[in-house]
Image (tube, rainbow, N blue to C red):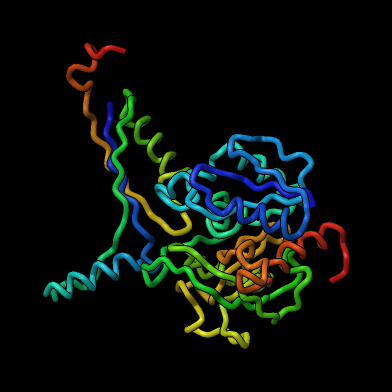
Amino acid sequence: MRTGIVVFPGTWSDRDCAHAVSDVLQEPVRYVDHREQNLEGLDLVILPGGFSYGDYLRCGAIARFAPVMEAVTDFANRGGLVLGICNGFQILQEARLLPGALLRNASCEFRCEWVNLRVEQSESAFTHDCRPGQVLRIPISHGEGNFFADPDTLDAIERNGHVVFRYCAPDGRVTADSNPNGSLRNIAGIANGPGNVVGMMPHPERACETLLGSVDGLTVFRSAIHALTRVPA
Amino acid sequence: MFRAEVFVTLKPVVNDPAGLTIKGGLHALGFDSVSEVRAGKYLVVTLDETDDRQARARVEEMARQLLANAVIEDYRIELQSIGNPIGAAERPA
């Protein structure tokens, strides 16, 4: 799986993503500068977490117009795998590759903690190896991850099975207590229609080694590898 | 020259945690009559246009493309002609 990791000014999780894919999974990785316009040869593009362009105006609002984003949009429309993590999720929404928006956390606090995620569907490229209902333990680290969509959009996302992850209790129950940021319906990650584009607030790249407390994040990246090679889960 | 003031606010249906927190602060200070606070952004855009309608159309376009996110925000534009700033002609290039 040839992976490109986009680096905007202010991106901070690019090296963590590269470590997970390259050092842990032994898959080839290259960094993609925000000014690049050619993504040829890549299978997966990751928009990592951080504070692109200082998150000025709105999270992801400036990054969305970086030269690389036109290429990312073409890549996504041609079926290439795109994973937006945290700030990357915000950028995908600003670019209208995914619906909704991410508001300031309901608590107004930056939350950096482990959360439990219930996998809602295994149709997306990044949950290919999961079974619906499976619980993944992955950390979050954000101040603006409060998922919002207008009621019609929210219903469409639900009806079409585009919710990929929900914040849940360790046993998989979706509860108010397990929602760290006020997200509508505990939504932590969503996919586009074909399932090749996924945005998620939690950081799977930070849960890829036992030393770090969980290897559940590997499931997300391994799913992408298997989705590409059509290996049955 | 024109100066456009752009007020960007969260749509009424969008929860505003910052506004709620500020309201809590005002209540703590004894401003009991405060029933709601909505927080937003205030942007001042100075632009080199000669025509009033053209200037407004440009700022509308800016608001639609970048300054506001239509999914969650509304915007209001107040446009003011500021002529040619004094000294602008003499300023070295």
Provide residue B45's location: percent of width, then percent of height. 31, 36
Q: Which quadrant of the view contains residue A196?
A: bottom right
Above or below: residue B9 compared with residue A176: above
- Residue for point 72% across, 64% down: A126
**Residue A231: x percent and y percent?**
88, 65
Q: Is residue A83 above or below residue A37?
A: below
Residue A158: percent from left, percent from top: 63, 73
Up-down: is A148 above or below A42?
A: below
- Residue B88 drawn at (x, y percent): 23, 17
Res B86 → quadrant: top left
In the image, taking residue A187 as reference, residue B78 lies left or right, namely left
Name the residue rendered at 57%, 81% in the picture.
Answer: A168
Q: Is residue B92 left or right of residue A180?
A: left
In this picture, residue A155 sits left or right of residue A233: left
Residue at 32 percent of width and 65 percent of height: B18
Which of A86 and A194 lies nearest the eye of the viewer?
A86
